[in-house]
Image (cartoon, rainbow, N blue to C red):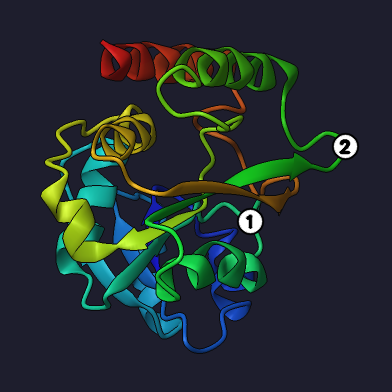
């Protein structure tokens, strides 16, 4: 279970405390200044440091460091529940799907309007290449070796979109399943801000091209 982390010390205890076997958290500390990496290690997680900035950089470092056949990715801000990981992982483990994406079902106030609109617009664009996808969700699962073979290059916020597009181009069996989405713990650095949403749109637009 790969958890990219940038200054998530407030959320880490709750997120890591919600894990149960067979899922094992692998925290990728992407330059935190609040002691997130040290705290994650104290809480029992395996921690990898990735000093190169960028969400995709952290995800790639986690993918390279992972040892399990099936890998999951999940935001570590408290907005997602690790108890729902089987929803995305089980179809991959069973060999029924190659990539499973979590479609966020948000509680009131969890997903800012500007971020929701941006996500919907991007989903409409990629649906031409990835039928049935309505969310570029932050919880997902696939086989590690297959992901490495996709040749993912984006190291910023275009990483999740590039994964879906290249998987579709490779004729992967892709499925979307609903997962709960709640208010994050602590201050948002990305989609909770207009500036972060704009940056995400820019990176994902580059991935589309």
Residue 171 seen:
yes
Q: Which mark is residue 108?
A: 2
Residue in the image at 61% along x and 39% along y: 187
Real-space Cα distance between discs 1 and 2? Answer: 15 Å
N-terminal of the pair, mark 1 or mark 2, is: 1
Q: Residue at x 53, y 48 (%)?
A: 175
Q: Quadrant of the N terminus?
A: bottom left
In terms of depth relative to the viewer, which is nearer, 137 or 24?
Answer: 137
- For residue 102, the mark is none
| Occupied quadrant, residue 158 | top left
Question: Given the current orientation, which residue lies at the most extreme bottom position?
Answer: 21
Q: Is residue 152 above or below residue 178?
A: above
Disc 1 target residue = 78
* Residues tagged 1 and 2 counted as in contact (Cβ below 8 A): no
Residue 27 screen position, x and y as percent: 35, 66
- Indicate whether 80 appears above or below 171: below
The percent position of residue 206, horizontal first and vertical second, equals 27, 13
x and y, in percent, of residue 125 in the image? 49, 12
Q: Is residue 41 left or right of residue 195?
A: left
Q: Is residue 35 visible?
A: no
* Mark 2 Cα shell of 10 Å, populated few (<14), some (14-19), many (≥20): few
Viewer-side residue, 133 vs 192:
133
Q: Residue at x 54, y 21 (%)?
A: 123
Q: What element does badge 2 sit on?
A: loop
Secondary structure, mark 1, is: loop
- Counting from the top left corner in percent of width and height, residue 18 is at 63, 77
Q: Residues within 10 Å of mark 1 (few under 14, many from 20)?
A: many
């Amino acid at each position: 279970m790969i958890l990219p982390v940038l200054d998530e010390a407030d959320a880490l205890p709750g997120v890591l405390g919600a894990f149960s076997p067979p899922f094992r958290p692998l925290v990728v500390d992407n330059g935190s200044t609040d002691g997130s990496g040290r705290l994650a290690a104290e809480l029992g997680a395996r921690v990898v440091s990735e000093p190169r900035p960028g969400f995709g950089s952290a995800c790639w470092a986690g993918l390279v460091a992972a040892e399990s056949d099936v890998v999951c990715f999940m935001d570590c801000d408290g907005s997602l529940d690790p108890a729902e990981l089987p929803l995305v992982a089980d179809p991959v483990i069973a060999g029924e799907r190659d990539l499973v994406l979590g479609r966020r079902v948000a509680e009131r106030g969890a997903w800012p309007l500007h971020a929701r609109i941006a996500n919907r617009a991007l989903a409409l664009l990629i649906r031409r290449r990835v039928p049935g996808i309505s969310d570029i969700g932050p919880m997902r699962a696939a086989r590690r070796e297959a992901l490495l073979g996709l040749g993912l290059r984006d190291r910023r916020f275009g990483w999740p979109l590039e994964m879906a597009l290249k998987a579709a181009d490779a004729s992967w069996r892709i499925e979307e399943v609903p997962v709960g989405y709640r208010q994050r713990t602590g201050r948002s650095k990305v989609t909770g801000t207009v500036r972060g949403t704009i940056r995400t749109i820019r990176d994902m637009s580059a991935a589309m091209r």
